[in-house]
Image (cartoon, rainbow, N blue to C red):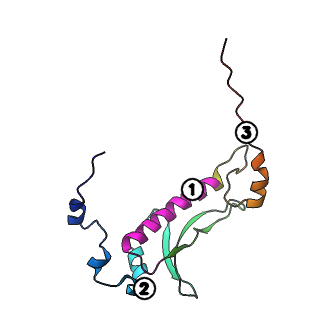
Amino acid sequence: MQQMDPRTLDELGMLNPTLAELGTNYADSQVTLRQFREWITEVGYPGYDFRVSESRTGAFYLQAAYMEPDTVSGEQGQQLTRRWLLSPHMLKGELVSTAFLCILTSMEHRVREWFLYKNRPIFHPHYDVDKLAEICEAREVRPPVTEPK
């Protein structure tokens, strides 16, 4: 695979600036809740609403919400993704990448909830991990292949 000339990306403004180029001390550079919320307005995915919040301890989190029936009750309602911890030293591109990962993880989570085998969600993401560990010995084993004579 041919490498792209990194100068082309730089000329397009697609490379993250180095800390020296930022002209600031990394430890002193902090993103505010307002900046995170401003940045996240530029991110979108159909059916998802992104939110950035601040905890009581001052930590920033990204979370997305979407509407879907509950897999247990069947009632339509707002579902929430896991919360993603955001560093106050993030660059905008890192927030965008985190939002992308949020959607990918949410999609996998939803597939695991709705995928059925024998009418049961065998890959459901909310099973008790200790119970899952107990069944680990019940592995499916392929019989040895015998060569025809």
16 or 70, which lies in front? 16
Kindly identify the amino acid type of the residue bearing the numbered disc 1: Glu
The part of the image, by quadrant, that contains residue 91 is bottom left
Confirm whether residue 121 shows in the render: yes
| Left or right of residue 125, residue 99 in this image | left
Residue type at the position of mark 2: Thr
Q: What is the distance, in whole Å, between disc 2 and disc 1 at their CAs? A: 30 Å
Q: Choose between 48 and 31: the one closer to the eye.
A: 31
Please tell me whether mark 3 or mark 2 is closer to you in this view: 3
Q: Residues within 10 Å of mark 2 (few under 14, many from 20)?
A: few
Q: Is 8 left, or right, of 92 in this rendering?
A: left
Report crowding for label 3: few under 14, some 14 to 19, many 20 or more residues within 10 A (C-alpha): few
Q: Nearer the viewer, mark 2 or mark 1?
A: 2
Which one is in front in this view, the residue at disc 1 or the one at disc 3?
3
If the image is split into quadrants, where does the N terminus sit? top left
Q: Position of residue 29 (x, y in %)?
A: 38, 84
Q: Which residues are magenta?
A: 87-112
- Residue 87, percent from left and from top: 47, 78
Of pointers 1 and 3, the one earlier in the residue sequence: 1
Question: What residue is rendered at 72% in x and 46% in y?
Answer: 119
Which residue position holds label 2? Answer: 32
Q: Which mark is residue 108?
A: 1
Residue 140 magenta-drawn? no
Q: Disc 3 residue type? A: Glu
Name the spot of residue 83 as percent of width and height, x first: 56, 72
**Marks 3/2: CA distance?**
51 Å
Q: Earlier in the sequence, mark 3 or mark 2?
A: 2
| Residue at image location 51% in from the left, 65% down from the top | 102
Outermost top residue: 149
Q: Could you say which disc has been placed on residue 140 in the image?
A: 3
In the depicted structure, whether residue 107 falls above or below residue 94? above
> Of helix, strand and loop, which one carries label 3?
loop
